[in-house]
Image: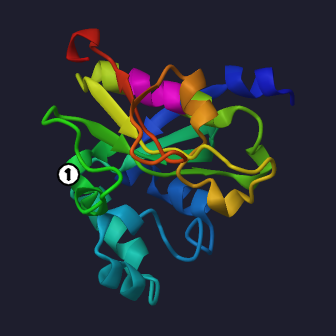
């Protein structure tokens, strides 16, 4: 299947109880990476490390979903989940509040995309930019005016996949995001303004 054929068949859904099993299948036995289950930004360091054992982080994510709280968005190829991005109000990601590099630049309500996970069989196919466009569509439908993220600008040509979990800047640029703050040279804050009046 070509890249264009994959993109043409993609659909996007927020994570819910109804598609939880597909999320589990996407993340696999390693919980995406090292039993993270996309809880790294949502927990204190101590609680996150503790949650790596006994499915703690997995259960914490399941609790978020069971309570109907926003968690993230999945990209589907036919009926298979092949990509994920965490996507929720910035306040839900407590590590951002304590970040020196990515602290708030204003008091506007924003939703954040702090991490991305792509099925290894679909990496380097342009899926990330399509997933971000799906997040933009979701934002439009749900009256979310500002999307914020913290991607990486690589300093080397070949980057191990495990270093790309915040997303690469070029993918965000392709999806229409703009740099909003650059306290970090290699990890800028980027934003997409659904309502251009919010700039």
* Figure check: 163 above or below 29: above
Q: What is the x, y in percent for residue 128?
A: 61, 36
In what quadrant of the picture does the N terminus appear?
top right
* Residue 83 percent across, percent down from the top left: 60, 45
Q: Position of residue 104 (x, y in %)?
A: 22, 44
- In the image, residue 47 above or below residue 114: below
Is 61 above or below relative to 35?
above
Q: Residue at x 66, y 35 (%)?
A: 127
Is residue 8 in view from this perspective?
yes
Q: Which residues are magenta?
A: 132-138
- Judged left or right of residue 193, residue 13 is right
Q: Residue 78, can we see it?
A: no
Image quarter of residue 178 = top left
Residue shown at 61% from the left, 32% from the top: 171
| Main secondary structure found in the magenta portion | helix
Quick one: which residue is furthest to the top in this view?
197
Q: Secondary structure at mark 1?
A: helix
Q: Position of residue 168 (x, y in %)?
A: 61, 42
With respect to residue 150, does 2 lie above or below?
above
Q: For this rendering, which residue is in front, 169 or 11?
A: 169
* Residue found at the very far right of the displayed protein: 1
The reply to whether the magenta stretch includes residue 136 is: yes
Which residue is drawn at the image coordinates 23% and 54% (left, top)?
92
Circle 1 packing at 10 Å, graded few (<14), some (14-19), many (20+), is some
Q: Which residue is mark 1?
A: 91
Q: Is residue 187 left or right of residue 104?
A: right
In-image side of 166 versus 159 (left or right): left
**45 or 138, nearer to the observer:** 45
Q: Residue at x 51, y 42 (%)?
A: 74
Is 44 within the magenta?
A: no
The image quadrant of residue 182 is top left
Q: Residue furthest left?
A: 107
């Amino acid at each position: 299947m070509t890249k264009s054929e994959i993109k043409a068949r993609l659909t996007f859904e927020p994570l819910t109880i109804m598609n939880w099993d597909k999320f589990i299948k996407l993340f696999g036995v390693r919980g995406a990476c090292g039993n993270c289950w996309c809880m790294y930004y949502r927990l204190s360091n101590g609680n996150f490390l503790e949650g790596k054992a006994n499915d703690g982080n997995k259960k914490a994510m399941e609790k978020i979903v069971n309570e109907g709280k926003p968690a993230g968005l999945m990209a589907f190829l036919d009926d298979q989940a092949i990509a994920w991005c965490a996507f929720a109000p910035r306040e839900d990601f407590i590590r951002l509040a304590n970040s020196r590099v990515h602290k708030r630049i204003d008091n506007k309500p924003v939703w954040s995309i702090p991490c991305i996970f792509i099925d290894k069989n679909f990496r380097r196919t342009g899926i990330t930019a399509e997933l971000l466009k799906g997040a933009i569509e979701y934002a439009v439908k749900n009256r979310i005016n500002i999307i914020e993220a913290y991607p990486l600008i690589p300093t080397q040509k070949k980057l191990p996949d495990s270093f790309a979990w915040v997303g690469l800047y070029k993918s965000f640029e392709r999806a229409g995001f703009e740099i909003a703050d650059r306290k970090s040279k290699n990890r800028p804050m980027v934003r997409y303004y659904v309502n251009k009046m919010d700039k």
